[in-house]
Image: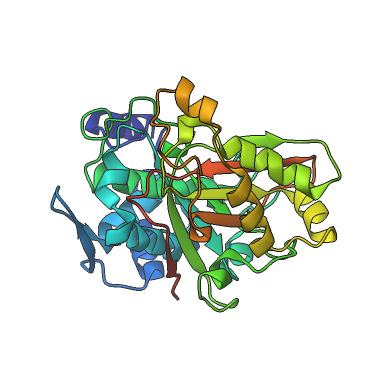
């Protein structure tokens, strides 16, 4: 077995970690779970011209350690990735070092054991870890976006190994993300965001406005100044419970963050930015995605900046 694993390293098809050797049997099981013939083409990634076929998805999902029941999520994630408005090639090769963040909603979360609570961005869940890893291996091995040759990220971030979370719909006081985006609550979906690493927000308070100000202040920094960019705000349990108890819904949360995520004139000057530029970090409510996820272990939320205004979040259905 060790010799087999080493051969995959020699072939350059790992992400730096050992992979599960794919066999005809486990590839066939994964193809069957994805619900399309093995030669079905999901799309072509331009400008590389790489054709993305189901069999290649299945092979990389097996290598990542996915169980067959994860196959429909991997299929949907790659389908979302290939959507034109997501700007897939830009996400795959950007020097900025972003990664596709996979957000799963709907009944499939509990069916396959996705983690939406404690350490939601961390280790411990096979489903989260291997689904995200499968997408990365597809980008590397099928789309040819391999670092450092084609993927030219200056720094990268750990999400370029795996970046998959689920929403804690049962523990949320608000409408789930996929319902906001036009899907029935009973429909399982994947939402993809081209994303940088999470920025944790720690604020010990029982006042909702102070929590939201800390989040707005995290967004309002010159290092993230990119008008039109998208931001995901993830509320762990303590913060979301405080906000809900004090009457804050998603619309009022968005409004507050938009109004307060503003750079000062001094910040613009010191960073050498044009003072005539808009000091607002967020120009439209659609630029803010709000999510309930994370555990109850303290007063935490996080901000996940998007890649650029050039890439829009995409939500697709998971079938079957």
Q: If the image is split into quadrants, where does the C terminus sit? A: bottom left
How many callouts does the rendering have?
0
Q: Position of residue 269 (x, y in %)?
A: 46, 24
Left or right, 15 with respect to 304, comes to: left
Residue located farthest toward the front when viewing the structure as drawn: 276
Task: Out of 124 and 300, give the one closest to the viewer.
Answer: 300
Q: Position of residue 96 (x, y in %)?
A: 35, 33
Q: Residue at x 51, y 44 (%)?
A: 280
Give the colour scheme of this rendering: rainbow
Task: Out of 257 and 136, give the one closest to the viewer.
Answer: 257
Residue located farthest toward the top when viewing the structure as drawn: 270
Task: Report if residue 117 is visible in the image.
Answer: yes
Q: Position of residue 101 (x, y in %)?
A: 46, 49
Q: Quick check: 67 above or below 202?
A: below
In terms of image quadrants, where is residue 156? top left
Task: Report if residue 124 is visible in the image.
Answer: no
Left or right, 29 with respect to 184, comes to: left
Q: Quick check: 62 above or below 197?
A: below
Q: Residue at x 51, y 75 (%)?
A: 182
Q: Quick check: 196 above or below 312?
A: above
Q: If the image is split into quadrants, where does the N terminus sit? A: top left
Q: Residue at x 38, y 29 (%)?
A: 16
Left or right, 167 with respect to 189, comes to: right
Task: Out of 249 and 55, give the one closest to the viewer.
Answer: 249
């Amino acid at each position: 077995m060790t010799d087999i694993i080493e051969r995959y390293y020699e072939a350059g098809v790992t992400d730096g970690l050992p992979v599960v050797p794919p066999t005809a049997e486990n590839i066939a099981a994964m193809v069957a779970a994805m619900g399309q013939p093995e030669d079905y083409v999901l799309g072509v990634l331009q400008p590389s011209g790489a054709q993305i076929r189901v069999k290649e998805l299945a092979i990389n999902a097996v290598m990542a350690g996915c169980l067959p029941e994860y196959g429909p999520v991997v299929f949907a994630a790659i389908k979302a990735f290939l959507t034109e408005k997501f700007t897939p090639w830009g996400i795959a090769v950007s020097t900025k070092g972003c990664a596709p963040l996979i957000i799963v909603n709907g009944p499939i979360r509990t069916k396959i054991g996705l983690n939406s609570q404690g350490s939601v961005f961390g280790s411990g869940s096979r489903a989260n870890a291997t689904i995200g890893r499968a997408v990365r291996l597809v980008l590397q091995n099928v789309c040819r976006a391999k670092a450092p040759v084609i993927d030219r990220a200056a720094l990268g971030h750990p999400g370029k190994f795996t970046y998959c979370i689920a929403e804690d719909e049962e523990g949320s006081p608000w409408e789930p993300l996929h319902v906001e985006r036009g899907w029935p609550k009973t429909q399982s979906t994947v939402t993809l965001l081209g994303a940088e690493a999470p920025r944790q927000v720690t604020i010990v308070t029982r006042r909702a406005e102070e929590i939201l100000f800390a989040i707005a202040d995290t967004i309002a920094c010159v290092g993230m100044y990119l008008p039109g960019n998208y931001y995901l705000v993830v509320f762990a349990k303590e913060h979301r419970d405080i906000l809900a108890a004090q009457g804050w819904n998603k619309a009022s949360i968005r409004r507050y963050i938009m109004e307060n995520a503003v750079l000062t004139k001094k910040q613009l000057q010191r960073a050498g930015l044009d003072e005539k530029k808009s000091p607002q970090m967020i120009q439209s409510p659609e630029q803010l995605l709000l999510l309930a996820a994370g555990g109850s272990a303290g007063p935490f939320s996080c901000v996940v900046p998007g890649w650029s205004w050039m890439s829009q979040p995409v939500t697709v259905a998971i079938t079957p």
